[in-house]
Amino acid sequence: MDFTTPDDALPTTETSTVARTREYLTGAEVETLMATARKSSRWGHRDATMILIAYRHGLRASEVCDLQWSQIELNTGRIHVRRSKRGTPSVHPLQGDELRALRRLQREQPPGPHVFVSERGAPMAPKSFHALIQRLGERAGMPFPIHPHMLRHGCGYALANAGHDTRRLQDWLGHKQIQHTVRYTELAPDRFKDFWR
């Protein structure tokens, strides 16, 4: 199954045998996935940090795998996001938990240009990240199969539900066209929360 999707189309809702009910992960599900990663292997901290960074910054699998230390300013708490698929690059602030996780990762792994590396010291491949997320989803008991792009969609929905306007959300996710961003605000259930009050 090809997990890469254009920005203007949601990933398919069918897997080989099980239909997914949605194409994003909630914040609580991301926390569960990270907790499962931490206790799953000796690479648990790296895996949990990858999930956190991909989710918070709406990164595609290729973007998180290609992330380099030169894009991260630990002293000022910023990450320079380079987008694939002709997306718009941007600079995002890093939260305290992200900074702590990245500093620990930098201390624990051998020096190199890439933030997330394999056991052999090479950059983590998107295919390996897909397999990791799928495996962690199964171990975490997720009620449907998951893939990395659900972290990006989860970011979009979480920020839309937090009340961020569509233009700012477009900039955060690096969409060239605003119609790719509108789906997050259109489907955000929190926009209806005061209808019956």
Image (spheres, grey):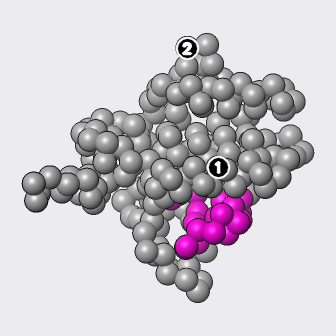
Name the residue furthest top: 75
Disc number at residue 34? Answer: 1
Label 2 Cα crowd, 10 Å radius (few <14 / some 14-19 / many 20+):
few
Q: CA distance from mark 1 to mark 2?
A: 25 Å
Any part of residue 86 in sight: no
Displayed quadrant of residue 148? bottom right
Q: Residue at x 26, y 41 (%)?
A: 163
In the displayed structure, 118 sits above or below 147; it is above
| Nearer to us in this view, 89 or 181 | 181
Q: Position of residue 197 (x, y in %)?
A: 10, 54
Q: Which residues are drawn in magenta? A: 131-152
Name the residue furthest right: 120
* Residue that carries the numbered disc 2 in the rendered image: 76
Left or right of 191: which side holds 105?
right
Going by the numbered disc 1, the residue's amino acid type is Met
Q: How many marks?
A: 2
Magenta-drawn stretch contains 99: no
Q: Quadrant of the N terminus?
A: bottom right
Any part of residue 36 in sight: yes
